[in-house]
Amino acid sequence: MEKIIIAIDGYSSTGKSTIAKRLARELGYIYVDTGAMYRAVTLFAMENGLLDGEVADREGLIRKLGDINIRFVLNDGLGYAETFLNNVNVEERIRTMEVSNRVSGVAAISEVRHKLVEEQRKMGEGKGIVMDGRDIGTVVFPDAELKLFMTASPEIRATRRYKELLGKGKEVTYEEVLENVIDRDYIDSHRKDSPLMKAPDAIELDNTDMGKDEQFERIYNHAMRII
Ligand code: C5P
């Protein structure tokens, strides 16, 4: 069977990673969560005094980029990879609201993007990869064989994310989550460098009223037509 690259882009909390993980498992592909990489850089900035309030100290962070090492390590018990920042497991810490509120500012810095895009391209060299993010089909792999663009209403996305965070025991309000989803989408879509947008050849999937199984089957069928 031919190995391909599957690029999944879209707005925040549209369920990209859930679909991408399942697809990778079914196909025996590698799954890469590029949002985790931008979150890890943000955590690094937070822990190294490289943020001025909510805003990144751009020059300071750029100088330190060489000190940031991000790896994904498979956790056999969980069945998926966890994110390591400089050899420390940060999977939990990168998912907090503190990181969510700052990550889009950090991700708008071109030097940060260049570093991470280069690493992402290396991961895809052997194909057989499902990668999700905001610029995978447009910038990282413009020649990806299958591109998807996921959308859903902000309210439904915030509701899903809110329930997920509550399930993990986090103290958040629905309003706070909705505001974060809307803010991130705005910053991600309006930044100068590789803004979030649908690649012309991407298949758009609005999952506002669609269950996980239906979404998965549609995407899986698209993949099987190519592979
Ligand atoms: O996917 P996730 O919601 O975890 O991504 C967190 C943030 O990282 C996004 O809101 C965006 O600012 C940034 N990001 C990006 N490019 C990617 C993946 C994520 O700019 N390819």
Image: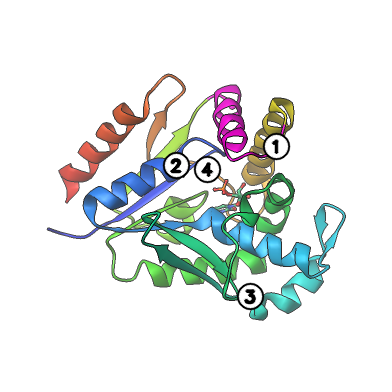
Residue occupying the point 63% across, 55% down: 94
Q: Nearer the viewer, residue 98 or 108?
A: 98
Q: Which residue is mark 1?
A: 180
x%, y% of residue 199?
Answer: 43, 45
How far is disc 2 from disc 3 in space, using C-alphas?
Answer: 25 Å
Disc 4 versus disc 1: nearer the observer: 1
x%, y% of residue 202?
Answer: 37, 41
In the rendering, which numbered label is found on residue 63?
none
- Residue 192 visible in the displayed image: yes
Q: Which residue is mark 2?
A: 16
Number of numbered markers: 4
Q: Which residue is mark 4?
A: 197
Of callouts 2 and 3, which one flags the residue occurring earlier in the amino acid sequence?
A: 2
The local secondary structure at tag 3 comes to loop
Disc 4 versus disc 3: nearer the observer: 3
Q: Which residue is mark 3?
A: 68
Range drawn in magenta: 153-172
Give the amino acid at mark 2.
Lys
x%, y% of residue 134?
Answer: 52, 49
Q: Quadrant of residue 11?
A: top right
The answer to whether the residue bearing label 2 lies less than 8 angstroms from the nearest atom of ligand 1 is: yes
Q: Quadrant of residue 183?
A: top right
CB within 8 Å, label 2 to label 3? no
Give the amino acid at mark 4.
Met
Disc 4 versus disc 2: nearer the observer: 2
How far is disc 4 from disc 1 in space, using C-alphas?
Answer: 19 Å
Q: Is residue 218 left or right of residue 37?
A: left
Give the amino acid at mark 3.
Ile
Q: Is residue 2 left or right of residue 73?
A: left
Residue occupying the point 68% across, 38% down: 186
